[in-house]
Amino acid sequence: MTAAPIRRIVIAGGGTAGWMAAALLARFLPPPHAEILLVESDEIGTIGVGEATVPLMAQFNGVLGIDEKDFVARTEGTFKLGIQFRDWGEMGNVHFNGFGDYGDAIQGVSPHHHWLKLHRLGDASPIEDWSMPYAAAKRDRFAPPEMVHRQGDEAAFYKYAYHFDAGLYARYLRGYAETRGVVREEGRIGKVELDPESGHVAALLMADGRRFAGDLFIDCTGFVGLLISKALGVAYVDWSGLLPCDRAIAVPSARRDPLTPYTRSTARAAGWQWRIPLQHRTGNGHVYSSAFLSDDEAVDQLMANLDCAPLSEPRLLRFTTGHRAKFWDRNVVALGLAAGFMEPLESTSIQIIQTGLARLVEYLPDRDFDPAVADEYNRVTANEYARIRDFLILHYCRSRRSEPMWEHCRTMAIPDTLAHKIAVWEACGRVPLLSEESYQEPSWVSIFLGNQVLPRRYDPIVDQLPIEKLRGGMNQRRAAIAQVADHMPPHTLFVDRTCPAPVAA
Amino acid sequence: MSNPKAIQSIVIAGGGSAGWMAAAALSTAFHGTDCRITLVESEEIGTVGVGEATIPPIQAFNQILGIDEAAFVRATQGTFKLGIEFVNWWREGHRYFHPFGRYGDDFGMTPFHQQWLRARFHGDPTPLSAYSLSDAAAFKNRFDRPLADPRSVFSTFSYAYHFDAGLYARFLRVHSEARGVTRIEGKIADVALDPESGFVRALTLENGQRIEGELFFDCTGFRALLIGQTLEVPYQDWSGWLPCDRAIAVPSARMADLPPYTRSTAHKAGWQWRIPLQHRTGNGHVYCSGFMGDDEAQSILLAGLDGAPTGSPRQLRFTTGMREQGWAKNVIALGLASGFLEPLESTSLHLVQSGITKLLAWFPDRDFDPAVTVEYNRQVAREFESVRDFLVLHYRATERSDSDFWRHCAAIEMPETLAAKLAMFRLNGRLIERDKDLFHEASWLAVMLGQGVTPQGYDPLADIVDPREMQAVLAGMRNVIAHTSDAMPGHAAFIARHCRAPDLRAA
């Protein structure tokens, strides 16, 4: 409300979340509308390793008005068309969750129903053959869709995301934010001062005695949740019973060409390993469950599975999957690890920061901090987390791998919302989408089919199309996609030509 | 190789709007397949449908059926509808309009109405309606079709229809029979169940004819012969939220200038509709029997007509609410059999349409896997609840306290979903959109503001736009809307030119 607008925003903690918040808030509330202060300490490391993202990222950059090539170059970035999953359903299984669909609906029915019919008739080709991003990824080629469509090809719809160095990204956004008036204060937060009457955070008291007061505080202090948890005492909703991994070991390795235009996730005996190709190196990590694997074994498995020499010592991270019972409490909004954590299996960490920020801007409070606003923010955010959680559990709960962790995942209780999705999918090949879904039908289909969870039937409308016509149409589609993909430049070449990272001084 | 368990025979129990809408959609979807569709109805049983007002999604339904708009409007004595005028709802003597379409164009970083709110806070008295082309055209009795081009002001509005529901059913019957639907005349005497599964196997008519099927639609109206009487699916009574339980309907003479909108006028214990058609005007008084006798209700209705009545008044009784499962076993209820929400926002036919399109999306096979049924029911319930909330808003947010009825309404406890929406809007005009809300932002905005719900502030981000720029943009939009609506053809002239219906008296 005009009577009491937020005049001063204090962001506690830099890192990816902190600087994303600073950049976006500076964009929406440029001086003189608000003063934005970010407090961080160079002594405290950030968690971000090599980051993979989802296509929503382009929207964030677009709102900021960031030039894509400049951003990719300065973050040692590469392009991403999806995620390749290896050994997930069973050893030797490979499938691809691409940023796209399997073509337009045919007679109002999604094409995976048509694929199911052909599959039943003995056609062995995977549904990925109908996916444009897969066709490009398989060839290690990449071009942005607008370039492909400019050439007049009727290629299928697809999107893309990025891989980048999260530390460099934070630095990049810092430059952006500081240019737009955000003030950075170096130092360690000693104490959080609460208003004795309202219980709101009044100020951050620094270890060196400085005091930073504010109207709205953004907690980006990582797992510790200095404001949301330590000061306000908001509880944590623990989901480790649903997603058993609780540790990760990360290590960079030397760049390897060709640069793959996709993230790779390889299932292991008690978890999975990521591979994120950047321009200057490859990010690797092993996410695992400490109940089923020791740290030493986890390190050994990771180091034995690098495709190039490691560039540093492995780093161990511990986490508890779950989220704060309230993401927004009183005048504090938590973002990033302070808000919650879900393993990066679908590269959702930055997405959740981004959607949280977009929601904060949509529900921007005034100094009255009416709890109705925070309630709505929390309701929507909790749903968003729960939907992603279900999507991640689906990767685990239907695997046929025999190791003890996989056995556990197959037999553990799953949320009702996911059980319902699986039951409906198995009954009729459709995915019931709930509110606040991050993943739409093609993504769910990709994970179901990729893990060989097949429905008992396909949509009856499919049978209205004569089989020869269906076969002909699908062969045509496959050929058209292949042709477009063949004409894309190699991803490595595209990166080196259009957005090479500046040579290190 | 088609699915060996594919549904091969569908039986629709009951004609009327619901039955024939189902028949038309199913026969279009399954045209050219082996699936047989039979509709059973009796000419002795009247249908409830009176003059019907609709909402814009019905255009999509007609398009899927491949129906030509002009032919449809002619055949149903139809007119066009740009929205609903609400009279006496906030206070006696007050009126507001719920337009189809949006208000203004977004500028800056907030939805358009936030700039309007901001201007208002700084003393600009212009009502939000000045930024709606639907609103401007409606009160000038003008109409034209919108355009898809997003740069044109003609893309900012939408429309629906008023028509004679009996004629619509007849129109769809022709459509359906041309696509192979078999119509059987007769009264249903018995519903046979499979003793093991409890599924409906056949309908037996009074003349002894037995009609077997695999999938049944219950379009038998309030009787709910299959879903209620036979399968005993309970009914959720919502009269605690929406207390009206009766209606009296009467037609009156055609209005010469054919207003392109429905009118709803609040009375002492309910409200009266007015639906202009080409051959007559449909009228009805929806009221609460706990607060008003039938005779008084009828006098109020007749006193509030714009023309002479052309028939005798008919009374309807109903219980607002919803069938707990719209789909049970192999029976799907549509129309009044599935639930009833008073026609205050013209949603009756939409709920039928939406049930059919959802069913086509979640079409079963002979396994009738319960997971699919659960999902269909979840979606249907969510939509009913969202309409319910929207209707409750009209009764709950009002300053009227001039009768026991309105004092009763003021004390109704709102559904939590509605309370949350109102709280957010009161604060600074933000609209929460819940999953599967049938009515979108502009509709909620129109009714919230129209019913006197006033935000205490506005979105702080609105202040980012320079105030002079804001005023210039707002003035420009008002100007375009005023001029564009002046240049549109009159509604009656538009109909005369494109889709004049035959004069029934001459026939």
Image (cartoon, grey):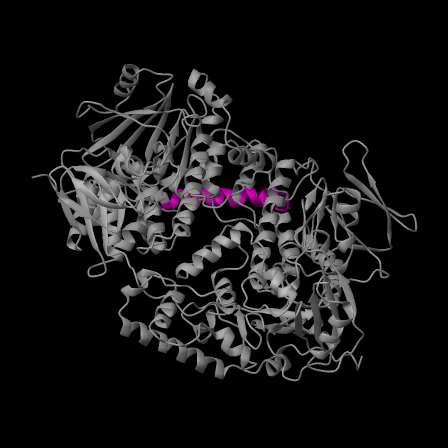
Q: Does the image show residue A151?
A: no
Q: Is residue A459 above or below residue A295?
A: below
Image height of A53 relative to B251, above or below: above
Quarter that holds the C terminus of chain B: bottom right
View extreme (left): residue: A505
- Could you tell me which quadrant the N terminus of chain B lies in? top right
- In the shown orientation, is residue B57 left or right of residue A177? right
Q: Position of residue B295 (x, y in %)?
A: 78, 71
Q: Nearer the viewer, residue A9 or A391?
A: A9
Answer yes or no: is residue B215 visible. yes
Nearer to the camera, A85 or A407: A407
- Residue B116 appears at what percent x and percent y? 38, 70
Residue visible at 76% across and 55% down? Answer: B221
Along the viewing direction, whichever of B46 and A41 lies nearer the viewer = A41
Is residue A481 part of the magenta span, yes or no? yes
Looking at the image, which residue is at 42% across and 19% down? A405
Main SS category, magenta section:
helix
Q: Position of residue B265 (x, y in %)?
A: 62, 73
Q: Report the span colored magenta.
A: A462-484
Q: Position of residue A275 (x, y in %)?
A: 29, 30
Q: In the depicted view, which residue is nearer to us: B133 or B403?
A: B403
Viewed as shown, does residue B75 lie left or right of B498?
right
| Left or right: where A121 falls relative to A21 | right
- Which residue shows up at 77% across the image and 36% down it? B198
Q: Is residue B304 magenta?
A: no
